[in-house]
Image: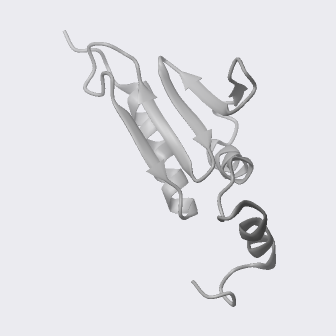
């Protein structure tokens, strides 16, 4: 990506953080995508944001999102996937996976 394709705001972010996707920017993008369906919480040490629903989590960090399902008896039981964030599409994909995990029906 050339400097001409990067917005000035993104260029400053890259200079400040060494990459385009600090956790604060990922969190903002996720909030837009979630459209009020979920809300962020802080971990016990106030180090990172996460979203929780039905024993599934999204953890937001610099340059990445971790999606985890701690549910039992579902297809996604104990799944943990890390997304390296390079675009808004990566954030949307991570959130779509999270939503699908929360809606899975338990197997008999």
Total marks in image: 0
In this rendering, the answer to whether 41 lies above or below 32 is above
Q: Residue 2 appears in which quarter of the rendering? A: bottom right
The spot of residue 69 in percent (x, y) is 40, 25
Left or right of residue 1, residue 94 in this image: left
Quadrant location of the C terminus in the rendered image: top left
Looking at the picture, tell me which residue is in the foreground, 51 or 16.
16
What is the basis of the colouring in this image? one colour
In this rendering, the answer to whether 10 lies above or below 72 is below
The spot of residue 25 in percent (x, y) is 72, 54
Looking at the picture, tell me which residue is in the foreground, 15 or 6.
15
Residue located 57% across and 23% down the image: 52
Residue located 62% across and 43% down the image: 61
Residue located 40% across and 35% down the image: 100
Left or right of residue 87, residue 55 in this image: left
Q: Residue furthest left?
A: 108
Left or right of residue 53, residue 17 in this image: right
In this rendering, the answer to whether 99 lies above or below 87 is above
Looking at the picture, tell me which residue is in the foreground, 16 or 89.
16
The spot of residue 80 in percent (x, y) is 38, 33
The spot of residue 99 in percent (x, y) is 47, 35
Quadrant location of the N terminus in the rendered image: bottom right
């Amino acid at each position: 990506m050339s400097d001409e394709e990067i917005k000035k705001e993104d260029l400053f972010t890259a200079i400040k953080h060494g990459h385009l996707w600090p956790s604060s920017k990922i969190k903002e993008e996720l909030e837009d995508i979630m459209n009020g369906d979920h809300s962020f919480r802080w971990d016990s040490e106030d180090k990172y944001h996460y979203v929780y629903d039905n024993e599934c989590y999204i953890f937001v960090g610099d340059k990445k999102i971790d999606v985890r399902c701690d549910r039992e008896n579902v297809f996604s039981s104990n799944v943990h996937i890390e997304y390296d964030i390079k675009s808004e599409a990566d954030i949307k994909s991570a959130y779509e996976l999270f939503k699908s995990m929360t809606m899975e029906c338990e197997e008999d």
